Structure formats: C-alpha cells, structure tokens
C-alpha cells in the first residue's frame, strides 16, 4: 500500500507493527487534538498556535532558571527567543487576515494558555525525557522532540480541519516546524 502511494523506502517488518521494539512516538494518537475542534476559523487557528508557542517559550524560560550550566542557560534563552519570533509571525498573520488590526496586548488577552507545542505540559515533557539540564546536547534533543511532536500535531490537525483557509494555515505552521527542526539539527551538529 505504501509503495503504491509513492514511498520509495518501504520495509516489511517481520511480525508487523505489533512486533516493533524500537523507539516510538509518545502519547496517545489523539494527544493535543483536544485543542482543535476541526471547525476553527483561520483566526482561531492562529490564536491556538500562538498559545502553543507561548507555552513553549515559558517552558524554556523556566528551564533556563533551573539550569546550572551557563551555556545551557543561554541555550534555553536562545530557544525561547526563537519562539518569540514564531509568535510574531503568527501575530502578523492574524492581523493580515483580520478585518480589524489588533495590538499585541489585546491579541494576547484573546489567546488561551496552558499547553505547549505538541500537546504536553511542562511536567509531562520533563517526566518523559528526563533531560540533563547541564547538557547542551540533551537540551537540543529535548527541543527537537518537542518540535517533532508539534509537527506531528499540526499534521494530525490538518487532516481534521474542514475550513480550507484554516487547513492552509495549519500546513504553513507545520512547514515552519520543519524549519525549526532543521535549525535545531544544525545546532546539534555544531556541538
């Protein structure tokens, strides 16, 4: 079936998917899906996406305070700055499609908070990955895991969203998550 859909590297795993013993995605298949009904208008999608970026930014700032190593602390702050840039692109997109321009303070009042990208809470990420907060590589690995979870979430949301413009926005945000993953990969390679 996969080969028929154009996939080039397809392997038949002995015992099927139930025999898989290597790393797997974490959490249930519907993880984070409660953040989206599937009927969101484009502006609502952007508000949820902004919220997820805000949650991740706060996560990195919290971990920067816990880190004992100055390089790791700086890395967490750099990661939080990246989330600010992504938030700004979401806020800009919001104003581009909104009939009324909204200042940033008013926009942030409309945004719900509480979740991180990928749909897990701070404690859930820390419990799952148990990162060494003194290791730059583990911090980048954690960030890559979160971005991969976010990419997966946006792909799952895209298949659920019914509004064409909202679907396009979700797919654009997913593409930005791919860029984040690529940047983190380059950062990992530089260590």
Image (tube, rainbow, N blue to C red):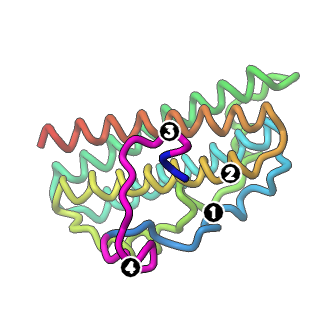
Residue 19 disc label: 4
Residue 157 disc label: 2
Q: In terms of secondary structure, where does tag 1 sit?
A: loop
Q: CA distance from mark 4 to mark 3?
A: 25 Å
Residues at marks 1 and 2 touching, judged by CB atoms closer than 8 Å? yes
Q: Is residue 127 visible?
A: no
Tell whether 103 sits left or right of 134.
Answer: right
Alpha-carbon neighbours of circle 4 within 10 Å: few (<14), some, or many (≥20)? Answer: few
- Vertical placement of 63 versus 180: above or below? below
Whichever of labels 1 and 3 marks the residue nearer the N terminus, that label is: 3
Which-is-in-front pick, marks 2 and 4?
Answer: 4
- In percent of the image, x 79 and y 43: which residue is there? 44
Alpha-carbon neighbours of circle 3 within 10 Å: few (<14), some, or many (≥20)? Answer: few
Residue 63 figure quarter:
bottom left
Which-is-in-front pick, marks 4 and 3?
Answer: 3
Q: In terms of secondary structure, where does tag 3 sit?
A: loop
Along the line of sight, the residue nearer the viewer: 101 or 36: 36
Whichever of labels 2 and 3 marks the residue nearer the N terminus, that label is: 3
Whichever of labels 1 and 2 marks the residue nearer the N terminus, that label is: 1
Q: In terms of secondary structure, where does tag 4 sit?
A: helix
């Amino acid at each position: 079936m996969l080969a028929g859909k154009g996939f080039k590297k397809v392997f038949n795993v002995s015992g099927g998917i139930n025999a898989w013993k290597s790393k797997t995605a974490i959490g249930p298949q519907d993880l984070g899906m409660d953040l989206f009904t599937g009927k969101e208008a484009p502006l609502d999608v952007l508000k949820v996406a902004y919220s997820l970026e805000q949650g991740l930014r706060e996560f990195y700032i919290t971990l920067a305070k816990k880190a004992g190593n100055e390089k790791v602390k700086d890395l967490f702050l750099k990661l939080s700055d990246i989330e600010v840039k992504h938030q700004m692109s979401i806020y800009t997109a919001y104003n581009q499609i909104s009939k009324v321009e909204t200042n940033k303070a008013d926009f942030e009042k409309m945004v719900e908070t509480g979740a991180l990208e990928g749909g897990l809470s701070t404690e859930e990420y820390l419990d799952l990955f148990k990162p060494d907060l003194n290791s730059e590589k583990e911090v980048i690995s954690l960030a890559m895991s979160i971005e991969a979870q976010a990419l997966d979430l946006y792909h799952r949301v895209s298949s659920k969203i019914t509004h064409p413009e909202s679907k396009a926005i979700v797919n654009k945000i997913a593409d930005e998550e791919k860029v984040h993953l690529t940047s983190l990969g380059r950062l990992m390679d530089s260590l």
